[in-house]
Image (spheres, grey):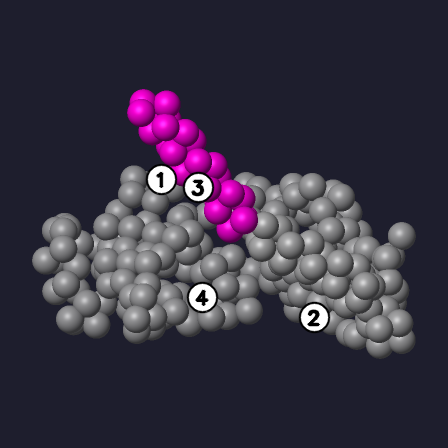
Amino acid sequence: MLRAVRFPAGGVGMRKDITVAAESRDSRGKNEARRLRVSGKIPAVVYGGAPDSVAISVDPKQLAAVLRSGAGHNTIFTLSVAQGESSPVMIVDWQSDPLRGNLLHADLKRIDLSQRLTVKVPVQAAGEAKGVKQQGGVLELVTREVEIECLPDEIPASFTINISELLIGQVIRASDLPLTGSIILLSAADAVLAHVISVRAEAAATTEETAETAAEPEVIKRGKKEEEEAGEDAKKKKK
């Protein structure tokens, strides 16, 4: 079994010393959202735990910076609402303009740092597989993220798998991940993260897919022809 996995430097502990300022808002609806965006803010909601959910407005640039950080939406930061609460939160959902890409709305969740969380963490590959470099194989990264459960302060930014020793036919699975601290793997243990296959196997798979695709029009064509023949037979019987 290959143990070719490591945490990137500084990759554990996704609570960051980041504070995002916000203001509570009473009115809602499209007109209010439009007014906020014109003023340089966007509507958002913070919920979970106590107090109840609160409608807020935030600077989209601050949230975009969090999403672009190494931990992305798994980053835990402080939300400071003017004349209100200050609590650790995560971005759990957001909407972006499909053309411009700028944020339009965000949902934030309060985080209890003493309670375990379920999150999805990206899987990255490092190195050049021997099965590719020496044997002429093809590397396939099959699973791009895994689901784990852990305490908020122990969420890894990512899992980096070292594929350097992978030969043709060898596999790195989710069960090979070194789970430290409070981390528990929720994804299937036998899920393939990466493997190296031979070029012949890759070509055979491609040929099979092409053959299946090419066969579909023929089936449709044959079915149509049979329907036409059946219709002609019915006409002859009537005569």
Q: Quadrant of residue 204?
A: bottom right
Check the image and report above or below for 121 versus 148. below
Picture disc at residue 9: 2
**Disc 4 marks which residue?**
67
Q: Earlier in the sequence, mark 3 or mark 2?
A: 2
Tag in front: 1 or 4: 4
Q: Which residues are magenta?
A: 216-239
Q: Are marks 4 and 2 in contact (CB under 8 Å)?
A: no
Residue in view at x 55 percent, y 69 percent: 70
Q: Tell me: 102 left or right of 78.
A: left
State the image quarter where residue 104 is shown: bottom left
Q: Which mark is residue 50?
A: 1
Cα–Cα gap, marks 4 and 2: 20 Å
4 lies above or below 151: below
> Disc 3 marks which residue?
224
| Residue 135 place in picture, x, y as percent | 89, 72
Left or right of residue 136: residue 215: left
Image quadrant containing the C terminus: top left
